[in-house]
Amino acid sequence: MNRLLRIFRLTLKYRKNLWLNLVFGWFSTFFGLFSLVLVAPLLEIIFYPQAQALGLPPVWEWSRQGISTGLAYRLQLLSQNYGPQGALLAVCLIIIAAILLKNGFHYLATRHASVVVNRSTEDLRNALFKRLLEMPQGYLTDSRKGELLARLSNDVQDIEFSMLSVVTAFFRHPLHIATYVATLLWLSPALTLFLILFMPLTGGVIGLVSRALRKNTRMAQQHFGRLIAHLEESLTAMKMIRSFKAEPFFSGRFEAENRLYTQRRIRMFRQADLAVPLGEVMGVAAVAAVLWWGGAMVFSAQISAALFITYIVVFAQLIEPFKGVSRSIYDAQKGVAALQGIEAMLEQAEAQDLPEGQVEFAGLQTEIQLKNLGFHYGGEWILRDLNFSIPKGKTLAIVGPSGSGKTTLMNLLARFYDPHEGQIWIDNKPLAELKLQDWRQKTALVSQESLLFNDTIAANIGLSHTALNQTRLIAAAEQAHALDFIQEQPQGFQTVVGDGGNRLSGGQKQRIGLARALYHGAEILFLDEATSALDSASEKAVQDALANLAGSHTLVVVAHRLSTVQSAQQILVLNAGRIEEQGSHAELMEKGGIYRSMVDLQAIK
Ligand code: ADP
Ligand code: MG
């Protein structure tokens, strides 16, 4: 119930439409009821076509007695003037009018319901995507793409469906039931006793089955998430799958997960399919009970036959909304399960959120310092006891074998993660105390794959800046040594780079990535193997760009080819997460340690 309320809360922003849905829904119920209550006079005419002598018109009274004598009088009047056939026609016309109104109002009600449902879902999707954009990197990288995709697509849709159910289960049906029950009470309080005894029984049975349903739904949604993860992984790895003929292995993995998912779905359907027949059986049982008891009342002349039949007709109409409520509660369980999944995901992400700092950061004054830094991905230490400093405007190079923790270190410097031990100090303030936005503004991480998207060069450099400053654009491109080749492109800055930038060479892409960082005002650049995938000529171009930035920018460069790092003021040799050697190129060559042997090795090649 609590969670149903949470789904309902999503719709509260559209209160106005909710109210209109409710009001129109009630009118629809009212006219439906009205058409049914007209059954009694209809029966009177059929059973007693002979018009009786008319007395004086009765005084109009708002009681059952008053209304029925009033109606009876008017019918007799009709019957007298136009014959029983004419009276019948009049009643039929009124019934048609009532049904027309009932359905017209029903249409209006559903119109507003669909606004509520679709708009709230739109809000939910937007909110989730916004949250996704600011989720901690640590959460996103743990191979959760599939789960995220499933949550954002499938689960949101489940919530959307259930929202409609919740809106009807909470408002329309209860209001409908209340109106009908009130009418029944008004028609015959004695008979209605049955109904009141019957209601909690129905509620109990529905509650029991729906709990089981929710559990299965939750499981099914989890399996679906894994299914999407398989799909995503296979799409990314398609070339590998084909070249290793690994299709049977991958389809086997998919089929196994798909089977688990399907089993849960079948169980879910079974439970949901139980809802409707169960509701109907209970409803018909109640009608039968009323028939039996009410029939006895007619025999003993406590109520008239026409009233009894009207009662039965109105009563039978209650089965629908009761079935509706149970169906809605089942449908809503899906949404509740989906909401649970989404909430769990958000909580997990939140647990890994980086704490937001408060100190403003306008630019590096003196140096970045690492003190006793340690980091792990939940297991062994990946980095340990790191102590070094990067003075402003200087270049620090980091070299070391693959897996020694270079990328991890860069991610810590860019603050995608926080260290587990020690601290990074920025001008004598811990990095974690600075405003993250400010830090991101002044720094940029450029990695091996430059991430270009299919748009113009200008848009790729400017990103969120829609109104591009032309002078700055050119200056940034020039600083990144990219201006020459950009101007040689057919449309200059307006050239579209193709999917993932595939119309440009690797070196050009990297320099556009660099220009992007510079355009956005980054003064501290972290380059993680930015030149490793490039051929020598492209590497030279990027190196020249970096040399251009030395002095005005603080650079931390991870490089595989040692020729790139020779000019750095300070070189750090990382091995298994610890600093093995540090010094300038000349000093390290002199020393004759690992660095020296690495240089020698590359020189031989
Ligand atoms: P490098 O960039 O020097 O090659 P990395 O920083 O990428 O090294 O990785 C250092 C170590 O951390 C490796 O042993 C790697 O297996 C591990 N590692 C990297 N990323 C993750 C991660 N997201 N989760 C768990 N372990 C990781
Ligand atoms: Mg790396």
Image: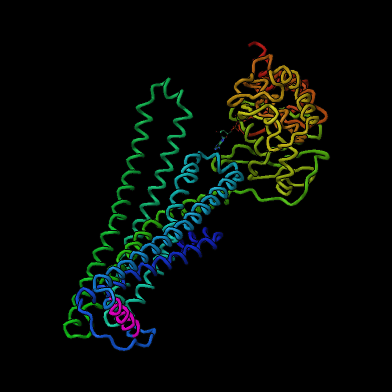
Dividing the picture into quadrants, the one containing residue 601 is top right
Write down which quadrant ligand 1 falls in. Answer: top right
Is 422 situated left or right of 59 in this image?
right
The residue sitting at 69% across, 42% down in the picture is: 372
Is 566 situated left or right of 105 in this image?
right
Kindly tell me whether residue 293 is visible in this rendering. no
Image position, residue 288 (x, y; %)? 20, 71
Kindly tell me whether residue 518 is visible in this rendering. yes
Q: Which residues are magenta?
A: 66-78
* Closest to the observer, 118 or 156: 118
Image position, residue 60 (x, y; %)? 38, 85
| Residue furthest out toward the front | 81
Image position, residue 498 (x, y; %)? 60, 24
The residue sitting at 41% across, 21% down in the picture is: 244
The residue sitting at 43% across, 64% down in the picture is: 25
Is 2 situated left or right of 192 in this image?
right
